[in-house]
Amino acid sequence: MLEDPMEELRRPELFDFHGVSMTNPFTDNWDNVQNFKARPDDIVIATYPKAGTTWVSYIIDLLYFGHMGPARQTSIPLHDRVPFLELYVPFLPSGTDLADKLPTTPRLIKTHLPVQFVPKSFWEQRCRVVYVARNAKDNAVSYFHFERMNSGMPEPGDWSTFLQDFMEGKKVFGSWYDHVNGWWEKKQTHSNFHYMFYEDLIEDYEKEIERLCSFLGVSPSAEEKERVRVSVTFDNMKQNNMTNYSTVPVMNQEVSPFMRKGKVGDWKNHFTVAQNEQFDEDYKKKMKNPDLKFRCEI
Ligand SMILES: Nc1ncnc2c1ncn2[C@@H]1O[C@H](COP(=O)(O)OS(=O)(=O)O)[C@@H](OP(=O)(O)O)[C@H]1O
């Protein structure tokens, strides 16, 4: 029995973990994560939280396994088909266990880890990596609402507190700036790497899917592509209980739905003029690589 019956209701606290802000659900299984045995055909879907992980995971899942028919799509939540590598919740199968037991190949594996924490076997096995990045302002807004609705995450505080913490990297999985830059640098040395932007996917879905298919080496028929396109629209994923996280008890979708808005530019409804100026000033100092460019409107 828990010593304190409120213990399980308390939100996790952030702490410094090898220089990155983390919480227990993502560090408690650390040895198994670090010793995870990747296979050469594994596909890693890596993101900073709220960058479009679920969307891209579902696209890739359907590209590989859509042909298995509706039973799989309607009975197994996406988060069981694409395990979250570092997630550990007592009494539930860990991300590493779920990945080990996946019945299908290639295994699709999701991670939010900053690049320096990724198990080395993924690099040794030269696994394919799909990294999805989203502009910092919309990413922050989406993360704020996610923390509000998810009691498995730390308390976000009010929007201005949250934004300050975001800029200082005091969020689970650390600094957005370090994350997108770290993975971008990895792309320069790991050849099996596809870096995608949420904004591109919103703006020109067809083109992005062509590029993704070519990277993955898959050639869906026109009918298959159309089935994927329809399934992964924002509205259809919002209605779909296998992709909208409605089955996850820590998420209170009445506070804010997981499938919230799915737009580029919602930051304009949150940032004050002063917050925007301060953010831009800080952004310029942290984002010095001219090759890594984000669009916060399209
Ligand atoms: N199909 C589709 N089209 C457009 N946008 C989509 C789609 N699917 C998910 N989303 C939006 O992605 C945001 C959730 O990000 P993640 O899936 O990375 O969240 S998580 O880190 O896995 O919790 C979250 O963004 P916000 O709406 O801005 O909060 C989702 O709405």
Image (cartoon, rainbow, N blue to C red):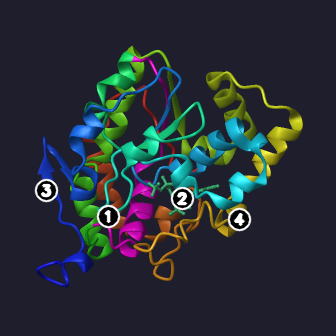
Query: Is residue 140 in the magenta section?
Result: yes
Position of the N terminus, as image quadrant, is bottom left
Nearer the observer, disc 2 or disc 1?
2
- Specify few, some or many for label 2: CA neighbours under 10 Å numbering under 14, 14-19, or 20 or more: some
Say which residue label 3 marks.
Answer: 15
The image position of residue 268, as x and y in percent, is: 48, 65
Say which residue label 4 marks.
Answer: 235
Magenta-tinted stretch:
125-153
* Ligand 1 sits in quadrant: bottom right
Type of residue at label 4?
A: Asp
Q: Nearer the viewer, residue 166 or 276?
A: 166
Nearer the observer, disc 4 or disc 1?
4
Relative horizontal placement of residue 50, taking residue 264 as reference (left or right): left
Disc with the residue nearer the chain's start (2 vs 3): 3
* Residue drawn at 87 percent across, 35 percent down: 222
Q: Is residue 172 visible?
A: yes
**Mark 4 to mark 1 CA distance (whole Å):** 31 Å
Badge number at residue 54: none
Disc with the residue nearer the chain's start (2 vs 1): 2
Regarding mark 3 in the picture, which secondary structure is present there?
A: strand
**Mark 2 to mark 1 CA distance (whole Å):** 15 Å
Relative horizontal placement of residue 59, taking residue 159 as reference (left or right): right
Tags 4 and 2 in contact by the CB under 8 Å rule?
no
In the image, residue 160 sits, relative to residue 182, either above or below, namely below
Regarding mark 1 in the picture, which secondary structure is present there?
A: helix
Residue 252: quadrant of the picture: bottom left
Type of residue at label 2?
A: Gly
The image position of residue 21, as x and y in percent, is: 19, 51
Say which residue label 2 marks.
Answer: 265
**Mark 2 to mark 3 CA distance (whole Å):** 31 Å
